[in-house]
Image (spheres, rainbow, N blue to C red):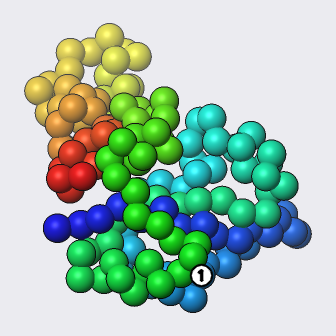
Amino acid sequence: MKKVLKVKIKRDQSGGATHYEYPPQYNPKKFQVITYETQLTDKMDVVIGRGNKDEYVLGFVEDVDVAGFLASPDIVEVNRAEADEFIGPDLDKATEKITDQNAVLIALAKVAKKEELSDEDKEVIDSSNKKPGINRSKSLREVLDENNI
């Protein structure tokens, strides 16, 4: 089983880049990131409102590793309702990503020339399948559901 943890990280923006400092109990090899606060639609203003000096990251940790993380006052376990609230309106948001640019361009060129698309071309531009081309990410709700949170 996995638990969801919310980790407070220090953030510093200088020289055009953002630098993060994690609590000493944070182990990136054992932490599966769900989302950073600043990746969420309505959270950047919240981070700025706190002085832009820290933000939170939400992620999964195996049960066996939870105690080591929770030794930090900057790391807390959250339940599903709290995770949903943290994520807010982005809970059901999914994104589309091009995973095979050439295949997509070939299919779109056929569309532009009003040529008939083959079944393979249609699969390439259909984000609901796993074929390389245009692919849809899982929503954060789906990620939480799949991990039984």
Query: Which residue is depicted at the point 59% across and 59% down?
Result: 56
Q: Residue furthest top?
A: 114
The quarter of the picture where residue 138 lies is top left
Left or right: 118 with respect to 91?
left
Query: Which residue is depicted at the point 71% across and 71% down?
Result: 10
Q: Which amino acid type corresponds to the residue marked 1 in the rendered image? A: Pro
The quarter of the picture where residue 98 lies is top left
Establish if 37 lies above or below 121. below
Q: Position of residue 3 (x, y in %)?
A: 29, 65
The quarter of the picture where residue 93 lies is top left
Residue placed under numbered mark 1 in the picture: 23
**Which of 100 and 8 lies nearest the eye of the viewer?**
8
Q: Position of residue 54 (x, y in %)?
A: 72, 63
The answer to whether residue 57 of the structure is visible from this angle is yes
Q: Secondary structure at mark 1?
A: loop
Q: Position of residue 63 (x, y in %)?
A: 24, 75
Query: Which residue is depicted at the point 35% across and 61% down?
Result: 4
